[in-house]
Image: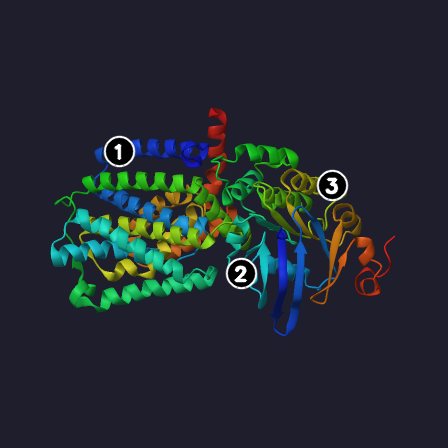
């Protein structure tokens, strides 16, 4: 097995685990509000990292990722609301449904690239948006669907640890995938799909697998998120949610493993504190993206890559 | 015994242009065949038809006697038909070593090897070792051509279709590519169909050539035989070869 023995996997795993151990102490020193903001940041790290797998590594610039998170959240929420199904069954069911829908959408957009793929996936997301809003008898529409909390408490600390654990597992899984043969094929497809085919890579299969995996991860994160925030509204499908994920990945470093990790948390934290300015906060981030791109097309990851390499060069 | 690679009556039309007109040819097992002809004669179209990039309007391609009709490109490659592109295609954001590794993984042999030994060997053979960790998009034209060829040889194929592997590169690298071709041909008995305008190399490598003109096969034979044909001189060579 290439993946688990590769130095890139080992280094990333060490860094992720060290960061996770340090983050264990946040609830001890931070207020409930701080713990809440960081918990939501974990949610966005998962969304950003799984979208980066699809867009950054494989070149499938989907604009439906927030929709898959919503599919996960609403699946578990509706199962609980209408039939009293436990979250422990609802969340995996949401992930599976999101993965299956990702498989279907991935098949539909197979031959599309760039702007065409972006528009088609966005249309899918808007369809889900319209459905959740319109079928209010079932989904409660704009009134909001109330969802049972996962642990029967609104104290953020247990959810903090849940999301921390989930983030670590997802990131390690993504890293292993990226270092596996499929990871090489993903990057090959992004660079030159015709050449990938000519070498013998079944590009259809790889693209659909990646679409399914990244959608299932979004659905999983969305499911847990729903049982934390306890009220779901179709706002989860506002385009600004997708734009947020894109901005997080681009600021962090599009197509680099560390990009979404270092991009998501700062963007979410600043957005939270700028929330009183409404939609203007996204305009603020657009400005940051423009300035950052001027200096480093690879985002924050491009700026810290030399330090990261030096760290391991010294320890090698 | 069936030919290693056989095209039978291939036709392909693009918006009124007959790019391949009833093209038939058979390359024997272990043969190195040259494919020559003027620009626009349909050589690259033939390469694309044989390797599954285009679907023929009619006709059939057989690899070691088995029909490739309906096979996707990647299936054709996995059956051992390997190609190179005229305009070098590499994975630009991947390093030299990662390009070789990807080529290995794409057609990984059943023996369970991880490809590291093959990568090491290929880095030596192509003399690209100092650039192993350099992104492919930063290579020079000749280095790119060498790497593309190296990728093709990572897992030995049974049949290679090379589209102008020698164009625009310096003599030292040309020699390196020729050596690689001869090595794979000798050691694995691989068959080659090589498109080239370099008559000295064609003469050195290819006992027989096929000439294409205006979408049709104009002649088969040794280079000296076909080079004497008046239509080949008039339509392609300009003057008799020395």
User: Which of the numbered marks, if any, corresponds to residue A191?
Assistant: none
Residue at x 13%, y 57% (from the top left corner): A81
Marks 1 & 2, CB-CB < 8 Å contact: no
In the image, are marks 1 and 2 on the same chain?
A: no
Picture layout, residue B199 above or below residue A131: above
Give the camera-side residue of A105 and B117. B117
Query: Relative to residue A228, is residue B134 drawn left or right?
Result: right
Residue at mark 3: B175
Mark 1 or mark 2, whichever is nearer to me: 2
The location of residue A152, given as percent across then percent down, is: 12, 45
- The chain identifier of the residue carrying mark 3 reads B
In the image, are marks 2 and 3 on the same chain?
A: yes
- The chain identifier of the residue carrying mark 2 reads B
- Local packing at callout 1 (Cα closer than 10 Å; few below 14, some 14-19, many 20+) is few
The location of residue B65, given as percent across then percent down, is: 58, 54
Residue at mark 1: A24
Q: What element carries label 3?
A: helix
Q: Is mark 1 on a helix, strand or loop?
A: loop
Q: Is mark 2 on a helix, strand or loop?
A: loop
Question: Which residue is farthest bottom?
Answer: B16
Residue A68 in view of the camera: yes
- The chain identifier of the residue carrying mark 1 reads A
The Cα atoms of the two marked residues, 3 and 1, are separated by: 60 Å
The location of residue A222, given as percent across then percent down, is: 26, 51
Residue at mark 2: B69
Give the camera-side residue of A101 and A74. A101
């Amino acid at each position: 097995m290439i993946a688990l023995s590769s130095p890139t996997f080992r280094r990333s795993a060490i860094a992720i685990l060290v960061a996770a151990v340090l983050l264990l102490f946040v609830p001890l020193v931070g207020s409930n509000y701080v713990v809440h903001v960081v918990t939501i940041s974990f949610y966005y790290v998962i969304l950003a990292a799984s979208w980066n797998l699809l867009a950054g590594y494989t070149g499938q610039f989907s604009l439906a990722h927030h929709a898959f998170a919503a599919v996960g959240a609403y699946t578990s929420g509706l199962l609980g609301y209408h039939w009293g199904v436990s979250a422990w069954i609802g969340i995996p069911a949401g992930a599976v449904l999101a993965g299956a829908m990702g498989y279907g959408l991935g098949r539909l957009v197979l031959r599309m690239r760039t702007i065409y793929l972006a528009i088609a996936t966005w249309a899918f997301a808007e369809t889900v948006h319209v459905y959740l809003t319109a079928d209010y008898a079932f989904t409660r529409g704009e009134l909001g669907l109330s969802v049972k909390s996962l642990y029967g408490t609104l104290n953020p600390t247990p959810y903090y640890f849940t999301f921390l654990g989930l983030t670590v597992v997802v990131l390690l899984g993504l890293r292993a995938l990226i270092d596996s043969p499929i990871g090489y094929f993903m990057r090959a497809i992004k660079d030159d799909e015709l050449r990938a085919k000519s070498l013998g890579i079944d590009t259809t299969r790889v693209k659909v697998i990646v679409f399914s995996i990244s959608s299932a991860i979004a659905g999983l994160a969305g499911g847990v998120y729903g049982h934390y925030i306890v009220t779901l509204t179709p706002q989860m499908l506002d385009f600004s949610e997708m734009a947020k994920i894109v901005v997080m990945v681009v600021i962090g470093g599009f197509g680099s493993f560390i990009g979404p990790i270092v991009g998501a948390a700062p963007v979410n934290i600043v957005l939270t504190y700028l929330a009183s300015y409404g939609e203007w906060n996204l305009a603020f981030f657009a400005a940051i993206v423009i300035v950052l791109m001027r200096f480093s097309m690879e985002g924050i990851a491009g700026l810290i890559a030399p330090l990261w390499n030096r760290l391991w060069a010294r320890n090698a | 015994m069936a030919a290693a690679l056989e095209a039978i009556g291939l036709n392909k039309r693009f918006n009124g242009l007959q790019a391949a007109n009833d093209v038939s040819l058979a390359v024997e097992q272990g043969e190195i065949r040259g494919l020559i002809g003027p620009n626009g004669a349909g050589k690259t179209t033939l390469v694309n038809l044989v390797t599954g990039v285009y679907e023929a309007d009619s006709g059939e391609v057989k690899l070691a006697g088995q029909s490739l009709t309906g096979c996707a490109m990647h299936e054709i490659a996995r059956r051992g038909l390997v190609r190179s592109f005229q305009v070098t295609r590499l994975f630009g954001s991947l390093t030299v070593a990662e390009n070789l590794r990807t080529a290995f993984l794409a057609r990984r042999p059943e023996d369970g090897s991880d490809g590291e030994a093959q990568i090491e060997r290929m880095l030596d053979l192509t003399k690209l070792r100092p650039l192993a960790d350099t992104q492919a998009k930063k290579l020079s034209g000749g280095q790119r051509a060498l790497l593309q060829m190296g990728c093709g040889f990572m897992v030995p194929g049974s049949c290679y279709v090379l589209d102008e592997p020698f164009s625009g590169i310096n003599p030292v690298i040309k020699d390196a590519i020729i050596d690689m071709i001869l090595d794979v041909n000798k050691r694995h008995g691989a068959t080659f169909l090589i498109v080239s305008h370099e008559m000295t190399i064609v003469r050195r490598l290819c006992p027989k050539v096929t000439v294409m003109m205006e979408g049709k096969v104009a002649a088969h034979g040794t280079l000296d035989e076909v080079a004497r044909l008046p239509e080949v001189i008039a339509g392609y060579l300009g003057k008799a070869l020395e």
